[in-house]
Image (cartoon, grey):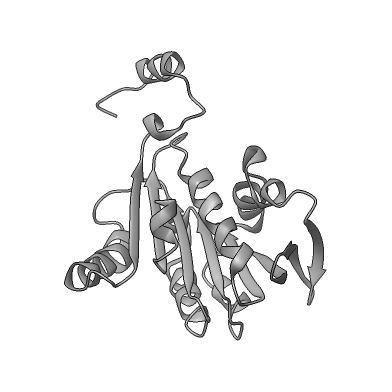
Amino acid sequence: YIKRSARCWLNIAEGGKRAGKNVVSLLAWAACLERHPDRLHLAAGVTEASARLNILDCNGFGLLHLFDGLCREERYQNRDALLLNTAFGERVVLVCGGGRAGDERRIKGNSYGSAYITEANECHPRFVREVFDRTISSRERKIFLDLNPKAPEHWFYREIMARHEALAKADASYGYNFGHFTMADNYSLSDSRLRELLLTYDPDD
C-alpha cells in the first residue's frame, strides 16, 4: 500500500479497529509531505479534535512523532496548523473538522498540495467533495483517506469508491490505491495477543 501510494493520487485505507490502517496511511503521507513541491496541505477529520488525535498524534505514530524535532504547532493565517521542516523547505499542514454541513466553507478558496481525511466516511459528503476540488491544482495531487467499514449502500461507497474503482478498471494508470486492513495486518500485535483479541469478537456482529 505504501509503495503504491507513491504513484497513486487517491489512496483509501479501509479496516476495522486496531487494523493499523491509520498508521500505514500516515507513513505514506509523511513520505509524500517530505518531498511534495507544494507548501500548503490539509489534515481533516470529523472534528478538528479527531484530526489532531488521529493524524497529528496517532498514539505516538502521527506527524508530530514522525517529524519529531522537525515540526512545530502554530497559528497560520488564524488557523491551527503544523509546520514541518523538510529537505525541500517548510510545509504547512492546516487542521480542520469536516463532519457538519457547512464545514466545507472553511476550506473554500484554498488550494492544497495533498490532503489526509481520517474517518472520511464519517465526514459530511460536501466536505469530502470539496477536499477533492481543493487539490485539483496541486503540482502532485495526493489524497489519503482512512475509514471504518460501513454498509454497502453507504454514500461513500456509492459516490466515491464505486466511481474511482470503475475508472481504475478502465485505465490501469488511473492512480487509485485501495487497501483493506484487518487486525492481522497490525504488526504491533503478537500472534498470541491477536488470538486473544479474536476470541472476544462475535463473528455474527
Question: Would you say residue 99 is visible in this rendering?
Answer: no
Q: Is residue 10 above or below residue 1?
A: below
- The answer to whether 98 appears left or right of 70 in the picture is left
Q: Position of residue 35 (x, y in %)?
A: 60, 67
In depth, the one of 39 and 203 nearer the eye is 39
Q: Position of residue 199 (x, y in %)?
A: 36, 15
In depth, the one of 122 and 100 nearer the eye is 122
The quarter of the rendered structure image containing the C terminus is top left
- Residue at image position (33%, 55%) is 178
- Residue at image position (24%, 68%) is 168
Splitting the image into 4 quarters, where does residue 175 fall? Answer: bottom left
Farthest left residue?
A: 170
- Residue at image position (49%, 51%) is 25
Q: Is residue 205 above or below residue 136?
A: above
Farthest front residue?
A: 87
- The answer to whether 42 appears left or right of 201 in the picture is right
In depth, the one of 46 and 131 nearer the eye is 131
Question: Would you say residue 137 is visible in this rendering?
Answer: yes
Q: Is residue 140 above or below residue 34?
A: below
- The answer to whether 42 appears left or right of 12 in the picture is right
- Residue at image position (39%, 66%) is 8
